């Protein structure tokens, strides 16, 4: 009964470093997305995918890349970390083809860029 | 485009007090409406939802009614507990295919319940 699994839970990066946040779901959901959560800003969509091989940009895609080679996995790559990317990141998944669909969230990754 | 506006927090209540968190929306057609809750240190989880006008969603003592005439989906609970301390998010998905199915979020309302 894993649901959505995100790793790592905490990460500290130096400016300019790159890293990948991992996200995996075992519910056969078509739709997966990445959000960042910042104080007073709510949840902002970074990238999303409606199925394997298909990705698209959300509200705040700059500085991030994604790929969707399988239904289960949706990693988020920070290309060259900047202090402005300090945030809490959440991965979510849901059925996309059904209206009223519930989104399932991972536990989050707290990223600090120094 | 679609949007969600919810009352700003933080909201601080004493245990057993009545809770209302206001949420209004802008959307074409008939969106589906959701309340998600985020407990400290955790991800978001669905609290309740309503999919058509006049529907009432309920869970864990919380209720919200889909009011199309006022474009609102206010969250209420008659008697809050310390364990209800969390951040509450109102959200919607549109009624059309494609990108309108994406979740549109309010900014969240932080609730602290004191014993």
Image (spheres, rainbow, N blue to C red):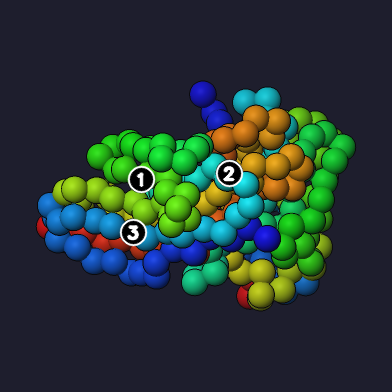
Q: Earlier in the sequence, mark 3 or mark 2?
A: 3
Mark 1 crowd level (few <14, some 14–19, many ≥20, 10 Å Cα): many
| Distance from the alpha carbon under mark 3 to that under mark 2 | 22 Å
Q: Earlier in the sequence, mark 2 or mark 1?
A: 2
- Can residue B105 be seen? yes
Query: Where A12 sits versus A10, above or below?
Result: below
Location of residue B103 in the rendering, given as x and y in whole percent from the top left corner: 61, 49
Query: Where A80 sits versus A90, above or below?
Result: below
Which of B26 and B33 lies nearest the eye of the viewer? B26
The N terminus of chain B lies in quadrant: bottom right
Tag in front: 2 or 1: 2
Residue occupying the far front of the picture: B69
User: Is label 2 in a helix, a strand or a loop?
Assistant: loop
Left or right of A52 in this view: B19: left
What residue would you read off at disc 1? B64
Which of B16 and A72 lies nearest the eye of the viewer? B16
- Tags 3 and 2 on a common chain: yes
Chain of the residue where label 2 is placed in the rendered structure: B
Tag in front: 3 or 2: 2
Location of residue A52 in the rendering, given as x and y in whole percent from the top left corner: 82, 34
Chain of the residue where label 1 is placed in the rendered structure: B
Query: Where A78 sits versus B39, above or below?
Result: below
What residue would you read off at disc 2? B30
Left or right of A102 in this view: B49: left
Residue B57 lies in what quarter of the image?
Answer: top left
Location of residue B26 in the rendering, given as x and y in whole percent from the top left corner: 57, 59
User: Is label 3 in a helix, a strand or a loop?
Assistant: strand
């Amino acid at each position: 009964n894993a649901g959505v699994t995100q790793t790592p839970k905490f990460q500290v990066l130096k400016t300019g470093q790159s890293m990948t946040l991992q996200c995996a779901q075992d519910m056969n959901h078509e739709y997966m997305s990445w959000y960042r959560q910042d104080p007073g800003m709510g949840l902002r969509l970074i990238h999303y995918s409606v199925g394997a091989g298909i990705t698209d940009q959300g509200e705040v895609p700059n500085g991030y890349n994604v790929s969707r080679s399988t239904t289960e996995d949706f990693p988020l790559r920070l290309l060259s970390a900047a202090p402005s990317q300090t945030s809490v990141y959440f991965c979510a998944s849901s059925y996309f083809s059904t209206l009223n669909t519930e989104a399932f969230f991972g536990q989050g990754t707290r990223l600090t860029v120094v | 485009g679609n949007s969600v506006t919810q009352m700003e927090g933080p909201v601080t209540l004493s245990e057993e007090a009545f809770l209302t968190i206001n949420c209004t929306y802008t959307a074409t057609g008939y969106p589906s409406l959701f309340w998600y809750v985020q407990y400290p240190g955790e991800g978001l989880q669905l609290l309740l939802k309503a999919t058509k006008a006049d529907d009432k969603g309920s869970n864990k003592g919380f209720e919200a009614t889909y009011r199309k005439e006022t474009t609102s989906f206010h969250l209420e609970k008659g008697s809050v507990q310390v364990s209800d301390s969390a951040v509450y998010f109102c959200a919607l998905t549109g009624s059309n295919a494609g990108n309108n199915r994406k979740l549109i979020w309010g900014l969240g309302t932080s609730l602290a319940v004191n014993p």
